[in-house]
Image (cartoon, helix red, strand yellow):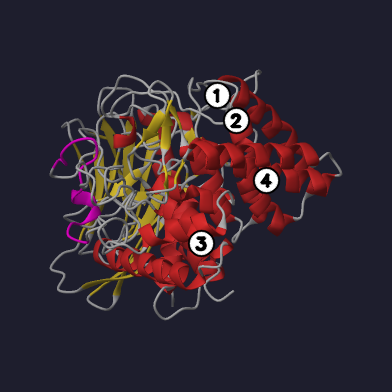
Amino acid sequence: MDIADKWGQGQIFAFSALDGKTCAENDFVGILSGDRLGIRFFTKVRRELALIPGGAKNLTFEMVTGDCIGAVVNEKEYIRILYHDTNLVVGSTGSETTIAVVFTESRTCAQYGENVCVQDTKDGDYTALAVENEKFAFAYGKSAKEAAERAENGLETDVEEAYRKKRDFYQRHRLEHAEYGRLYSKCVSVMKTQMYSEEGRFCQIWSTPDRLPHRHLWLWDSAFHAVGFRNIDADVAQQLILSVFDSQYENGMIPHMADTVNRSLITQPPVLAWGAWKVYEKSENKDFLKKVFEKNEKFLLWCEANRRPDNEPLYAWKVKDDANCRCGESGMDNSPRFDSEKVLKAIDFSCFMANEMRYMGKMASELGEDAAKYDEAFLKIRNAVNRRMWDEEAEFYYDYSVRDGEFHRVETVASFLPLFAGICSEGQAEGLVSWLKDPETFARAFPIPCLSAKHECFGTDMWRGPVWLNYNYLVLSGLKDYGYQELADRIQAKTLKMVNECYLRTGCLFEFYDSECQREPWSLNRKGAVVEPYDFRIRYQSVRDYGWSAALILDMLHHLNC
């Protein structure tokens, strides 16, 4: 059966809003351990639920997803571990020789009743482990009594029935494909763990990039999540888009990040009309389309009023004096584009805005609104980009320095977005394609690196050389639109192959990948050197089980044979 079955350190393990009520403010979520059959939960003091097989000679996995694990010991003892509720993990050890234990980073522990042990870490967090024969339940609470009662009640769960229900979900949402079936299932699993239920400002299901270490909603991540999830449930995909607008300010601005209470003061790439339209193609829900159209219009007007350095219809990101994240707005936090801290008319921001105008025009036509003004706005941006940002000699698009009045010559993947936005002419597209075919710049072992390999900063640190799957997805879309199907197919095939091989080795999907195929994603720099053993509390690494990686790989796989 094509169900994810690869164990790997750092995989997210969490309860999903698709199965019931979650609580982002008191999230009880873990990651798979790397050295044993265990799950490490990130309460204030970290604790680990582990199953210790007695004298096991053979351990195999039949299912390893973000909320359910099925293993077989010695070909006859069936281990089950699954999220049954937002604060409750239940399971069975399969035999009396396999035991369930809890380890904590402090030594506080107390018996509570006959078969329940409470882990009180003296910080307001409590967990409890209840064991009865081969069944166990591990629960979180804000008091010893709450945790203990939850765990004790968890022993009443029919573990095999609960396991079957989890497995049925992945059987319903699978891709029958000899090579990529398990990868598709892994993508479904990761996407499922991203989901939070209605809470605080959010009036419906919302998503987060990876649950750990990120716990908030992010603007463009949510659009990418929706694009992937439309293939599974278009209604949920609609909710993911609408939740972004729940964070919108009165003046129209949408923050790059928000939680149930707080929101940031910078924005992120405008991709909501594009994402919503792709969801609408599945849902055909005009009420959804109308809501997005009205709210997104306010956002785009805010961008026009606040992110143009002059009257020219070109857009500039907000930058700050932080070497590790000079431009969080662009999403390309530490790209060498921003090392100089110059105000740049940005090729990516301008292309995203042009593309949004295209899709607002589509939405307007569908809703019986005035589409002409969006078509006109698109043409104005297109003409300005080609006039100001196209270097005829290099056959490449560049950011434009407002202060210097000249090209800011840093070759990044952002400069291929005119393909995605439909901005370039056929001749300009041909010029861009020559860069994508050049092994000294962007045609690396794993294309497309986010920075040209010729650049002096090219390496493995986040936006300074690795491959980001969201940009691969956008560039592939543009190549197909311009008729470069063979090149698009070749890059997509390489992308799927490299991501799949990495998943089979590590059990994880990653935030970004090595374009040189020399290092595993977890060993790449991320605004500094990696930390071993893996501990994101000290330093983030290429984040494991990353949301848009799962969503966009799933969308590629879903449309493989279309």
Q: Which residue is mark 2?
A: 313
Give the amino acid at mark 2: Pro
- Mark 3 surroundings within 10 Å by alpha-carbon count, few (fewer than 14), some (14 through 19), many (20 or more): many
Q: In the rendering, which numbered label is found on residue 308?
A: 1
Distance, label 1 to label 4, CA atoms, is 19 Å
State whether residue 331 is above or below residue 548. Answer: above
1 and 2 marks in contact (CB < 8 Å): yes
Q: Main secondary structure of the magenta part?
A: loop
Disc 4 residue type (three-letter): Arg
Query: Could you give the CA–CA distance between mark 1 and mark 2, rounded to whole angstroms?
Result: 7 Å
Is residue 390 visible to the viewer in this orientation of the structure?
A: yes
Residue that label 4 marks: 358
Q: Residue 42 is drawn in which quadrant?
A: top left
Kind of residue sitting beneath label 1: Arg
Alpha-carbon span between mark 3 and mark 2: 25 Å
Mark 4: give few (<14), some (14-19) or many (20+) Cα within 10 Å.
many
Name the mark nearer the viewer: 3 or 2.
Answer: 2
- Alpha carbon separation for disc pair 1 and 3: 28 Å
Q: Residue furthest bottom?
A: 178
**Mark 1 or mark 3: which comes first in sequence?**
1
Q: Position of residue 356 (x, y in %)?
A: 63, 41
* Amino acid marked by disc 3: Leu
The residue lying at 40 percent from left, 66 percent from top is 491
State which tag comes first along the sequence, 4 or 2: 2
Magenta extent: 517-531
Q: Residue 548 appears at what percent x and percent y?
A: 45, 50
Q: Earlier in the sequence, mark 3 or mark 2?
A: 2
Cα–Cα gap, marks 4 and 2: 15 Å
Instruction: Classify residue 364 as left or right of residue 417.
Output: right
* Mark 4 to mark 3 CA distance (whole Å): 17 Å
* Image vertical order of residue 203 relative to residue 434, above or below: above
